[in-house]
Image: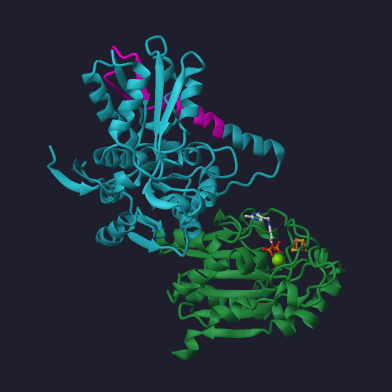
């Protein structure tokens, strides 16, 4: 078994990407994700890779579009306002069905907002990234180890579905140091050849990377194809975790950093005899809809905990579908303490 | 018998959708002939713009990418960094390159990205039905300058090619025109040199081609050729603007 090393979340993302065979990074500086480009700028040249600081996030995401279409594993990372600018490229990448990994180390918005950790980009990541009917596959790690594992896995998932994958973290997770264990590095030369990629039409038909479909039937077919892909993603890629849920009557639903804080609050509540557990979505798209619905017979009340004014709660409510009350706790700008979540749990569950 | 002209291998058999008298097709053909002559069709990846040439990927018989509006140089950068041994070109209109895509072209040029850009200046937005482009001439009527372009309100015709030629990154930058057989021969020479610069690893090259849009200029194809010579050429003078081979 590989040795554990102490590493900062952001840097661990970079190392995981390199180990997944990613040799190309295009990005633009923004806090609190700056350690990712710095790590890639330092490490990629050692692997004959390319680090390029683009003139803007718009350019960076379009560079990713070009590199992904050329058959490479490619990474870009940013924080909230930068992701808004990357939206154009991501929509084209999704439309042309190209694989890539996009990291968003969320900070608090809207507008320029501030650099405090936040989960305010849930809607953007899972629903409204940019124009058109498309989805990214969105992973929400809650530990540095998970940042590593899901970044690595993200490249495989992106390739398998020819779809952009987002790793959605926050400033807290990005800056956190934790011991991590890395997988064996993968040699990009040994990855299966992407027959559709543009690398010069030597002795073959030409390849075209494109998302334009002018004829109505063609346009519908293109969108149908995407829709069918998302159905496969929903059927096969949902990931979630449960904690102390066996006999629980209250379920906290939280992801990422909120889930870490909630776990602590749940332990404190359990000491007081409150029967509470955690449902932690690991994929935000596809959302663990059925998995949450399956708990409705047992769970009497749900509490969604987010570093936002309430975004994921809409998906939790859709999953619960009116069968049980779904309450909300969240703060943004300020990272809440486990004690605050505990107080909500006490109010919900009584101090029985 | 010596073959003088034939249909270029680097063009597909698809018929151009361009309007009668539009010089987009002329420039396509020149690029295809050059790909044939340099024997690079199987080594080339082209990037099509958003504009009337949006379907260029159906005409060039090489690997192609369709870019979003103005971002072709960024897309080409991504491609070239993955395949530094391949030939990468962008084909862009004046709205695409000189308006929405100014940042991308400036920085690709400034990095000396080893790609070739063909910049079609027709002083108008063709595809969207004839709006003002940043290259539109003073007094020129478009749907968004119905009283003629007023420099005080709408700014001046932008000289992107001159601007780019002061950067240190580019190897070869020239302005040519596609409105007469004599000018087309010169245009081909410049375009070929631009591709050769890339093959020699000299870095960014760009050729601006003055081009016609009879449809949105609202004049007959033949008059468009004259209009280009009479009104565009004085504002956009032809010639080499940067050539590192001459400096060496
Ligand atoms: C982001 C975005 N904005 C606007 C458009 C609409 N649009 C399509 S082509 C075009 C102008 C193209 O003009 P030009 O680049 O000069 O090319 P031409 O058609 O003249 O060859 C515009 C504004 C678009 N497709 N995408
Ligand atoms: S609208 Fe203008 S630029 Fe477009 S094809 Fe017609 S003539 Fe050419
Ligand atoms: Mg134009």
- What span is colored magenta in the figure? A226-252
Say whether residue A188 is visible.
yes
Shade representing chain B: green
Is residue A238 located in the magenta-colored stretch of the structure?
Answer: yes
Q: Residue at x 46, y 27 (%)?
A: A234
Q: Residue at x 51, y 57 (%)?
A: A58
Q: Residue at x 50, y 56 (%)?
A: A62
Residue B85 x/y as whole percent:
41, 64
Is residue B133 located in the magenta-colored stretch of the structure?
Answer: no
Residue B233 x/y as whole percent:
73, 82
Residue A202 x/y as whole percent:
47, 55
Q: Residue at x 61, y 55 (%)?
A: B57
Chain letter corresponding to the colour cyan: A
Say whether residue A190 is visible.
no
Query: Which of A54 and B208 lies nearest the eye of the viewer?
Result: A54
Task: Point out the image quarter for the N terminus of chain A.
Answer: top left
């Amino acid at each position: 078994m590989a040795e554990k090393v102490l590493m900062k979340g952001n840097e661990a993302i970079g190392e995981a990407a390199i180990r997944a065979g990613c040799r190309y990074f295009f990005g633009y500086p923004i806090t609190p994700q700056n350690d990712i480009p710095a790590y890639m700028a330092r490490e990629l040249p050692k692997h004959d890779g390319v680090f390029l600081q683009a003139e803007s996030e718009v350019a960076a995401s379009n560079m990713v579009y070009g590199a992904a279409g050329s058959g490479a594993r490619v990474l870009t990372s940013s924080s909230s306002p930068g992701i808004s600018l990357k939206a154009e490229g991501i929509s084209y990448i999704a439309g042309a069905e190209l694989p890539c990994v996009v990291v968003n180390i969320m900070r608090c918005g809207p507008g320029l907002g501030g650099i405090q950790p936040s989960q305010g980009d849930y809607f953007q990541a899972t629903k409204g990234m940019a124009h058109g009917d498309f989805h990214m596959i969105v992973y929400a790690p809650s530990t540095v180890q998970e940042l590593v594992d899901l970044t690595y896995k993200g490249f495989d998932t992106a390739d398998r579905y020819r779809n952009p994958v987002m790793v959605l973290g926050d400033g807290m997770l990005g800056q956190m140091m934790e011991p991590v264990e890395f997988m064996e590095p993968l040699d990009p030369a040994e990855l299966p050849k992407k027959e559709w990629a543009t690398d010069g039409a030597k002795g073959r038909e030409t390849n075209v990377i494109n998302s334009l479909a002018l004829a109505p039937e063609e346009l519908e077919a293109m969108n149908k194809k995407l829709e069918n892909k998302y159905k496969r993603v929903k059927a096969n890629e949902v990931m979630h975790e449960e904690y102390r849920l066996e006999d629980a009557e209250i379920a906290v639903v939280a992801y990422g950093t909120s889930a870490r804080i909630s776990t602590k609050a749940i332990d404190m509540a359990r000491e007081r005899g409150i029967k509470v557990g955690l449902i932690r979505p690991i994929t935000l798209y596809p959302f663990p809809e059925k998995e949450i619905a399956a708990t409705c017979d047992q769970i009497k009340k749900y509490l969604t905990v987010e570093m936002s004014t309430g975004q994921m709660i809409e998906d939790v409510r859709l999953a619960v579908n009116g069968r049980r009350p779904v309450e909300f706790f969240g703060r943004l700008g300020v990272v809440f303490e486990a004690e605050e979540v505990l107080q909500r749990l006490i109010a919900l569950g009584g101090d029985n | 018998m010596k073959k003088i002209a034939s249909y270029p291998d680097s063009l597909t058999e698809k018929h151009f959708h361009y309007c009668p008298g539009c010089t987009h097709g002329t420039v396509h053909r020149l690029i295809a002939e050059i790909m044939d002559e340099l024997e690079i069709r199987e080594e080339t990846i082209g990037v099509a713009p958003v504009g009337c040439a949006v379907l260029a990927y159906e005409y060039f018989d090489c690997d192609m990418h369709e870019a979003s509006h103005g971002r072709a140089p960024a897309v080409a950068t991504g491609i070239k960094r993955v395949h530094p041994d391949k030939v990468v070109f962008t084909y862009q209109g004046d709205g695409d390159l000189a308006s929405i895509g100014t940042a991308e072209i400036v920085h690709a040029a400034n990095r000396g990205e080893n790609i070739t850009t063909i910049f079609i200046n027709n002083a108008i937005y063709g595809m969207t039905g004839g709006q003002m482009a940043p290259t539109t001439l003073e007094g020129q009527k478009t749907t968004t300058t119905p009283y003629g372009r007023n420099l005080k309100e709408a700014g001046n015709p932008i000289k992107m090619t001159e601007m780019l030629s002061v950067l240190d990154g580019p190897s070869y930058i020239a302005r040519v025109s596609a409105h007469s057989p004599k000018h087309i021969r010169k245009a081909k020479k410049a375009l070929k040199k631009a591709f050769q610069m890339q093959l020699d690893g000299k870095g960014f090259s760009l050729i601006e081609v003055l081009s016609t849009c009879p449809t949105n200029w609202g004049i007959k194809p033949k008059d468009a050729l004259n209009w280009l010579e009479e009104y565009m050429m004085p504002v956009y003078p032809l010639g080499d603007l940067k050539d590192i081979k001459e400096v060496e």
